Image: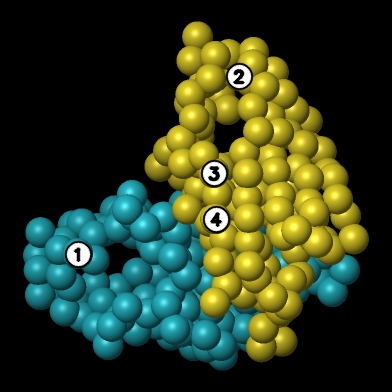
Chain colours: A cyan, B yellow
Amino acid sequence: DAGVIQSPRHEVTEMGQEVTLRCKPISGHNSLFWYRQTMMRGLELLIYFNNNVPIDDSGMPEDRFSAKMPNASFSTLKIQPSEPRDSAVYFCASSRYDRGLGTEAFFGQGTRLTVV
Amino acid sequence: KNQVEQSPQSLIILEGKNCTLQCNYTVSPFSNLRWYKQDTGRGPVSLTIMTFSENTKSNGRYTATLDADTKQSSLHITASQLSDSASYICVVSAKAGGGNKLTFGTGTQLKVEL
């Protein structure tokens, strides 16, 4: 398996533009997480899906952020309109719940977003 | 509120020396705790994972401990190498919604120097 695949790896956009980040989880995993990482705040959980259903979106900062998971192999995180303070690295992670071990989450390489 | 606190925030050590990183958490209901290593510009990679009943686990030169009573964990790195320079993140998993919710610490930035 190629692991969690995110695209694009880098995105530079102007303030006010719409940005869509994409994630392909590991096949067979039933949980998907979107995280944002900045120097100031570290890793922050934005939203968490289980079996394609959003379970906890309390970390989504504002209505400008939205996430979808239309099927088990694809998820998007959209920011509209984007602002400079959204600049960060956005990570997608997936996991398969194992009653014995709990969750082992595997991360993608991240999308570095810069909003100018 | 679920929280994970790590210390120190940053650490510089000489190559070959040992070091210990700390993690305190207030997460419930507890499922498991893992330590991740994150190299600059890359996603986190899991080092160890421990459930409630485990109090120590090793992965090469990395040894993690867990005290579920005091809700503390440590990561001990033996005979450090330059390649150990990275951010080390403590992650605690809580059972939620039929799956698990992860709470991340802000990490300890380790730099190993010659």
Marks 4 and 3, how far apart in space?
A: 7 Å
The C terminus of chain A - image quarter: bottom left
- Image disc number at residue B81: 2
Amino acid beneath label 2 = Gln
User: Could you tell me which secondary element the residue under label 1 belongs to?
Assistant: helix
Is A38 on the left or on the right of A58, as rendered?
A: left
User: Could you tell me which secondary element the residue under label 2 belongs to?
Assistant: loop
Marks 3 and 1, how far apart in space?
A: 27 Å
Amino acid beneath label 3 = Ser
Single out the mark in the foreground, 3 or 2: 3
Residue B60 seen by the camera: yes
Determine which residue is flagged by label 3: B7
In the figure, residue B47 lies in which quadrant?
top right
Residue A111 in percent (x, y) is at: 36, 57
Residue at (71%, 87%) from the top-left corner? Answer: B98
> Are marks 4 and 1 in one subunit?
no
